Image (tube, rainbow, N blue to C red):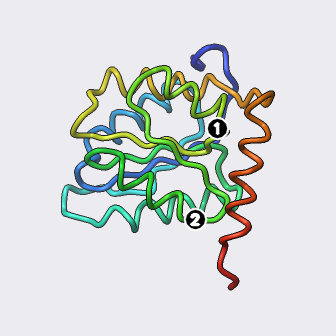
Amino acid sequence: MDLAKGGERMRIVIGSDHFGLPLKNVLFEHLKERGHDVTDLGVYTPEAVDYPDIAETVAVAVAKGLYERAVLICGTGIGMAICANKVPGIRAAQVHDIYCAERAAKSNDAQIITMGGQVIGPELAKMLVDAYLGSEFVGGRSAPKVEKIRGLDRRYRRPG
């Protein structure tokens, strides 16, 4: 087992649209090689699919506690982040560099990172995932901010 930065084995879910499929496949293998318990929720073929469908499936699974963390990939990562953040209780962060990947976990307690398969290469994507998974929420000055995010989520959540 070769877990990044001495981290622990995690239950991770990954998903993509057709634009993110090649990068998703690379990251799926990378995470398995690192010793994580990884579930791939699609897509599996290059036929066009709407990214909101995949983002919702993955984000709901994370919100239910079935997975500790998730990775979503579309063309830019933007659409996946927007959609995942619509699921109550989810904090998804689009990442494009190591610092952002670390801060997603350390400062924002994000359960999901998103990235763009058309703008990030495979080696950088592996580094981003490793940096994210190797980071934990540190609390401190970030704790009240994350609590305010939770408050917004509760305040604007639609019943039913």
> 19 left or right of 148?
left
114, 17: nearer the viewer: 114
How far across and how far down the image is residue 27, in percent?
Answer: 40, 34
Q: Mark 1 points at which residue?
A: 108
Q: Is residue 148 above or below residue 132?
A: below
Badge 2 density bin: few <14, some 14–19, many ≥20, Cα 10 Å: many
Amino acid on which the number 2 mark rests in the picture: Val
Residue receiving disc 2 = 87
Q: Earlier in the sequence, mark 1 or mark 2?
A: 2
Query: In what element is the residue under mark 1?
Result: loop
Q: What residue type is labelled 1?
A: Asn
Inter-mark Cα distance, 1 to 2:
16 Å
Q: Nearer the viewer, residue 72 or 10?
A: 72
The secondary structure type at the circle numbered 2 is loop
Locate residue 6 relative to residue 131 in the image: left or right. Answer: right
Front-most of residues 76 and 61: 76
